[in-house]
Image: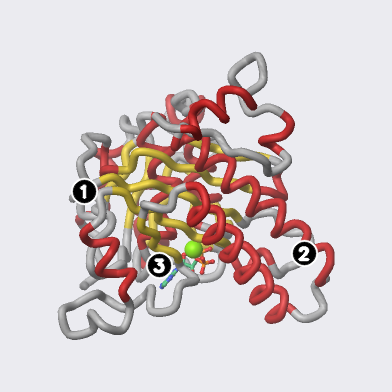
Amino acid sequence: MGEQTKTSARMAGPSGRPGPEELAGGTPPVNDSAFARWLADRAGQVLLQVRAETGHDDGKALKAAGDQAAHELLRAELARWRPADAVLSEEDEQSRVAWTEENRTEGGSRSDRLGANRVWIVDPLDGTREFSEEGRDDWAVHVALWTADSSAPARLTAGAVAMPARHCTLATDHAPAYPPMPLESATGGAIRIAASRTRPPAFVTALAAEIGAELVPMGSAGVKIAAVINGEADAYVHAGGQYEWDSAAPVAVALATGLHASRIDGTPLVYNRADPKLPDLVVCRKDLAPRLLAALQRHLPSQ
Ligand SMILES: Nc1ncnc2c1ncn2[C@@H]1O[C@H](COP(=O)(O)O)[C@@H](OP(=O)(O)O)[C@H]1O
Ligand SMILES: [Mg+2]
């Protein structure tokens, strides 16, 4: 490895964890998972600052300022520290447009990422709505690394989900312990399904009723998957629309933890596709997956 390794080793604290200068935004770690955590944390600090400075009077302006500031930080740091890698970011112009030969000239970065071995898939601010609402802490920064030649599940080799207002970041450098089965589940109590607080898919309500589950509404895909990782929910079920950046980073952490993550029809999640739409997913404990996927089969929305 190159100079980055040496510099990072010099900067690291005695435990191998980031030293004070790294945390302050100095030289980042060379390891991709630790770098993802560092980057997500830095963008999170910027978002907290934007929230404090802009205030909540004009929610639209706050959303725009947050999106922009976090996006610019991620873009600049990725260009500086990982210049050879491609990037797929929610906030890039044209990011939602499926790449085809016909629109090749409109957005070079999309064709770059399709031929690239390493692609950072980032959502500078997930849970934008919640970010703009005073007092809410269910919003996140997502940083994931997809690697074409990787044998990692979903080819996601690194991921970090920073939840700055909760002072918590989950990342693949220290994959969290597999969540314990809650007593209620072991004894047949209600399964807790995390779902969107503002637009839960209609079929999720029917699904929950069928299996006797309780819906736990919250904002941000990252925060919902983090709730499954932390054992605060048993599953996250989503359908009806989303993009790769909404799930790549939290799915990377969930898979590193040993959880189940797939499309709601049970097929694998695939990232860095020409069309970045990834409209549905389920993340849950492995023991729950067969039961949940069987129930989902009966409730699959028509595509
Ligand atoms: N039907 C849909 N179509 C497109 N994106 C959706 C969607 N439902 C949820 N999302 C996206 O998924 C993220 C989590 O949403 P929710 O909190 O409602 O569960 C949000 O990301 P952003 O905040 O990055 O836009 C939201 O835009
Ligand atoms: Mg998002």
Q: Secondary structure at mark 1?
A: loop
Q: Residue at x 47, y 28 (%)?
A: 175
| Residue at horizontal 43 percent and vertical 38 percent from the top | 253
Residue 209 visible within the image:
no
Answer yes or no: disc 3 within 8 Å of ligand 1: yes
Secondary structure beneath label 3: loop
Mark 3 residue type: Pro
Q: What's the residue at 83%, 62% (across, down)?
A: 52
**Residue under pointer 1:** 268
**Outermost residue, left side:** 101
**73, above or below 192, in the image:** below
**Total residue callouts:** 3
Does residue 45 appear anywhere in the picture? yes
Spot occupied by residue 136 in the image (x, y as percentages of width and height): 72, 59
Q: Earlier in the sequence, mark 3 or mark 1?
A: 3
Count residues near mark 1 (Cα–Cα under 10 Å), then give few for <14, some for 14-19, many for 20+: few
Give the vertical position of 75 relative to 229 (above or below).
below
Instruction: Say which amino acid is labelled 1.
Output: Pro
Question: In the drawing, does residue 131 fall left or right of residue 194?
Answer: right
Nearest the eye: 263 or 202: 263
Give 182 or 264, whichever is nearer the viewer.
Answer: 264
- Disc 3/disc 2 C-alpha distance (Å): 29 Å
For marks 1 and 2 on the same chain, the one whose residue lies earlier in the sequence: 2
Residue tagged 3:
201
Residue 178, relative to residue 64: is it above or below? above
